[in-house]
Image (cartoon, helix red, strand yellow):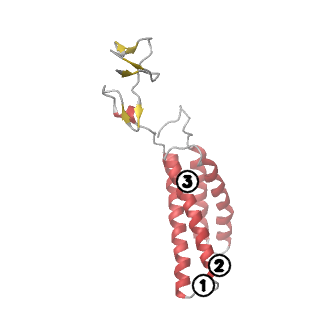
Amino acid sequence: MYLTLWGAVSSGSPTVNGRARRGVPVRPLVILGRVSDPSPVPDAARAVRPVHRARTVAAVLCGLEAVALVAFAGFYVYELALGLGTDPARVVMSAVLIVLAAAGLAVLARGWLRWTRWPRTPTVVWHLLLVPVGWSVAQAGRPGLGAAVLAVALVALGAAYVAPRPDDTDADPV
C-alpha cells in the first residue's frame, strides 16, 4: 500500500516511470519531519523553512533586546535589594512590566525564527516607538546610548520591511 499525492491509499505500484497514474508526479508525504515514502529524497527537499538573513537579523535583534530588558529588570531589583529604590512597590511593578516586555520580544524572536507570518507588525510598532526614545536619550546627554537605541530600531525596522513572508514563493533565501 502506498500513499498517493492526494492522500488516498492504493495497493500495488503507485507510479509508472516515476509518474503517478494520472500523469502527476508523486511527492512523498511529510509527517512530523519524516518522509512516508521510502524512496531517497535529497536533504534540500526535506528543509521545512528556508533561511533568510533579514528574518534572522530581526530575530537576533528582538532576542538581544529581550535579554537587555531582563538585565535591566534585574538591575532594578538589585537596586531595591541594596535599599536604593525610593518606592519598593513602584520598583517591583516596573521590573514586572519590563520582564513582560522582554517576554513579548522573546516571543517575537521565536516567531521570526519559526518562519511565521505574524511578527512583522508588532516588530515594526515596537521599533517605531523606540525611535523617539533613542532620540530623546541622545538629547538628554547620553548620545552613545541614544545612537545605539536608534541604530537597533532602524536596523530592525529595515529587517522587518525586507524579510519575506512565509507565503512568498519568489523569496530569495539569502
Which of label 1 and label 2 is nearer to you?
Answer: 2
Residue 43, numbered label: none
Q: Earlier in the sequence, mark 1 or mark 2?
A: 1
Q: Residue at x 61, y 83 (%)?
A: 88
Q: Residue at x 55, y 73 (%)?
A: 73
Reply above or below: 86 against 140.
Answer: below
Q: Position of residue 96 (x, y in %)?
A: 59, 71
> Which residue corresponds to mark 1?
85
Foreground residue, 73 or 155? Answer: 73
The crowd level at tag 1 (other Cα within 10 Å; few <14, some 14-19, many 20+) is some
Dot 3 lies on which element?
A: helix
Q: Which residue is mark 3?
A: 108
Which comes before the other along the chain, label 2 or label 3?
2
Q: Residues within 10 Å of mark 3 (few under 14, many from 20)?
A: many
Depth check: give the residue in front, 10 or 92.
10
Total tally of numbered discs in the picture: 3
| Residue 18 placement: quadrant | top left
Which amino acid does the dot numbered 2 rest on?
Arg
Q: Which residue is mark 2?
A: 90
Compute the Cα span from label 2 to label 3. 27 Å
Q: Residues within 10 Å of mark 2 (few under 14, many from 20)?
A: few
Instruction: Note whether 28 is above or below 55 in the view shown.
Output: above
Identity of the residue drawn at 53% across and 31% down: 169
Q: CA distance from mark 1 to mark 2?
A: 9 Å
